[in-house]
Image: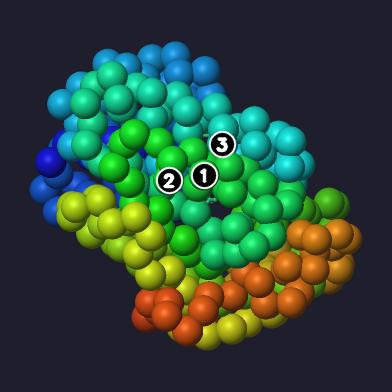
Amino acid sequence: MKIVVAGGSGMVGRHVVAVAQEHGHRVVALSRATGVDLATGAGLAQQLEAADVVIDVTSTATQSAQQSRQFFGAVTRNLLEAEGAAGVPHHVALSIVGSDLAPFGYYAGKALQEELVSTGRIPWTILRATQFHEFAQQMVERFRFGPVTMVPTMTSQPVAAREVAERLVELAEGEPQGRPADLAGPEELRMTAMVKAYTAATGIRGLVVQIPLPGGFGKAMRDGTTLAGLDAQHGVQTFAQWIDGLSAAR
Ligand SMILES: NC(=O)c1ccc[n+]([C@@H]2O[C@H](COP(=O)([O-])OP(=O)(O)OC[C@H]3O[C@@H](n4cnc5c(N)ncnc54)[C@H](OP(=O)(O)O)[C@@H]3O)[C@@H](O)[C@H]2O)c1
């Protein structure tokens, strides 16, 4: 198959590209670094020729609902339009558990993305996953100010990005499914505990400070809205095993 991975250089995108290549597929990874700006659509059309499926794992680092809707709205519309023109028969998107119930902040863009995909003309599959183990690393990269890392008060069910990628490629290889079961990690953890474990394992010094985010988004982080339901599938690798892998690699 020819599989196009939108956001193929990202945290989960790199795994999607690797897994798809291991499965013997022809893979085209799209990102601004490869000359394709999906927010404008520049350079996109020719990359979709003869594609069997597009997996969208793009993202933007914002907590603003307006910016998130602008990004996911533009990227999704551009992808779906170009897929329609190229005759691509399947669009796979990665979303987040809880984005429908708490369409605030970053999740507002994910809710719009889901709406556009599920009401569009291209046969579709949307997988919702919980936070990756690697989300702890993203927290440090994005919310570390001097020696202090700010972390929202939040319970999560972290799942390995590699396992999410394996599921996305499996879904891309099959028929469009609409909404398959959500994918969550094997256990519930506090986000502060995850970030503290990550900083300890990687030798990053400083304070990890827990902050209850205001508004509906903060409430959703705290009240379990972002946890998967009873019908979810579960990944196997625990957060502690992922941390052990980081420590061993140092
Ligand atoms: N992180 C999590 O814990 C988590 C959990 C569940 C679901 N998700 C979902 O998984 C998806 C991927 O998340 P991630 O954390 O892996 O993202 P990420 O690491 O931030 O990677 C984002 C990717 O999008 C690309 N990109 C950004 N703007 C672009 C543009 N204008 N044109 C083309 N490419 C662009 C980036 O490449 P360039 O910057 O080079 O363009 C990069 O390849 C998101 O939709 C997110 O909502 C994430």
Q: Which label is found at residue 72? A: 3
Q: Give the mark, 2 or 3, whose residue is nearer the N terminus.
A: 3
Task: Give how far across and how far down residue 172 sits, in percent.
Answer: 24, 51
Instruction: Give me the residue at 50% from left, 47% from top.
Output: 114
Question: Alpha carbon of mark 1 to alpha carbon of mark 3: how far?
Answer: 11 Å
Which amino acid, by three-letter code, is at mark 2?
A: Ser
Which amino acid, by three-letter code, is at mark 3?
A: Phe
Q: Check the image and report above or below for 247 versus 167.
A: below
Task: Give how far across and how far down residue 33 sits, in percent.
Answer: 45, 26
Q: Which label is found at residue 118? A: 2
Say which of marks 2 and 3 sits in front. 2
Query: Residue at label 1?
Result: 115
* Circles 2, 3 touching at the beta carbon (< 8 Å): no
Question: Alpha carbon of mark 2 to alpha carbon of mark 3: how far?
Answer: 14 Å
Q: Disc 3, ligand 1: is the CB inside 8 Å?
A: yes
* Circles 2, 1 touching at the beta carbon (< 8 Å): yes
Q: Is residue 59 left or right of residue 47?
A: right
Q: Is residue 48 left or right of residue 134?
A: left
Say which of marks 1 and 3 sits in front. 1
